[in-house]
Image (spheres, rainbow, N blue to C red):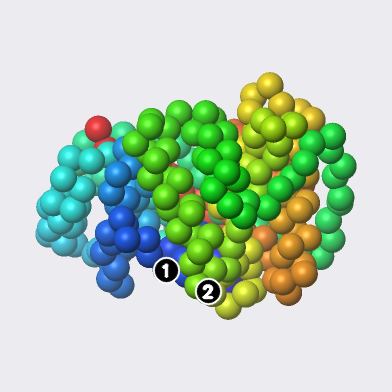
Amino acid sequence: MDEQLWTYVRGVMWDYESVPDNVEFVERPALLMYKTNGSSSFLSNKIAKVEVETDEAFDQLIGEVERFYQGNPYSWWIGPDSKPEDLILKVESAGLEHEDTYYGLVKAVDQWEKVDLPYSIRNVVDEDDVRQYVEVSAYIWGYDDATKKTLVRQRLEYLKAPGRRGGLLVVRDGDRPVGYAGYRFSSDGEAMYLSGTGVLPEYRGQGIYRALLSRRMELASSYGSNWIVTQARKGTSEPILRKLGFMELGKYEVYKST
């Protein structure tokens, strides 16, 4: 495995410009976890890295995790560099259940195919755009009202953030938002992280997903990045991206608290 490219795959989860006020985190060499106050989504509360060597250290870690999340739902991402080697068994014994599999996928920014659509792809620049972006993503992923409110506030703060190195896109059929996508650049500028893409069910199969990827690859090329990097969900974006030339570096098994 190319260690530098895997560093970018891991960076999808924590290589951010800044931390929003409503996000609390623990960051140590052996542990990285964060929670988003005001969100009930387990994907907004994430253990992104664990590297412990002994059973005693793991038992202490579990206690710290429970105190940190205080009964709120969270996800535990177990990748190829997680430790110990039997971490999955330990997490299962702690009562977490397997939720999904995500693949670390990369593609060189060398060429892209422009995709024409009968719909507009708009850069998110104001509050109306943000609300449309959140509206379509919430419909696809089933976010509750509290989570939507939190997401709107976060996205508005992000647009105003100094040193922002990312952006948001929304696809509209007339005035209706029908798809969305996000992106940001790595701290060294070498990679673009794809930070989520979704299309309403009734609009799928029309090339919207490919068009959003093409737009972001064009942006990455103009920025001077060499790689497009993402964590792709098994059976959804993952097979599409493989067909579009992305290669796999490794995978995460995602467990969810119960």
> Looking at the image, which residue is at 48% across and 54% down?
156
Image location (x, y in percent) of residue 214:
78, 51
Q: Would residue 248 appear left or right of 78 to someone viewing this image?
A: right
The tag on residue 96 is none
The residues tagged by marks 1 and 2 sit, at their Cα atoms, a distance apart of: 9 Å
> Looking at the image, which residue is at 84% across and 34% down?
118
> Looking at the image, which residue is at 77% across and 67% down?
221
Of the pair 256 and 14, the residue shown nearer to us: 14
The tag on residue 163 is 2
Q: Quadrant of the C terminus?
A: top left
Of the pair 258 and 38, the residue shown nearer to us: 38
Q: Can residue 108 be seen here?
A: no
Of the pair 162 and 184, the residue shown nearer to us: 162
Circle 1/circle 2 CB separation < 8 Å: yes
Q: Which residue is mark 1?
A: 18
- Residue type (three-letter) at the residue carrying disc 1: Ser
Image location (x, y in percent) of residue 257:
27, 38
Image location (x, y in percent) of residue 12:
51, 59
The residue most toward the bottom is 188
Q: Can residue 217 be seen here?
A: yes
Q: Quadrant of the N terminus?
A: bottom right
- Residue type (three-letter) at the residue carrying disc 2: Gly
Q: Secondary structure at mark 1?
A: loop
Q: Compared to 66, does 257 lie above or below?
A: above
Of the pair 234 and 38, the residue shown nearer to us: 38
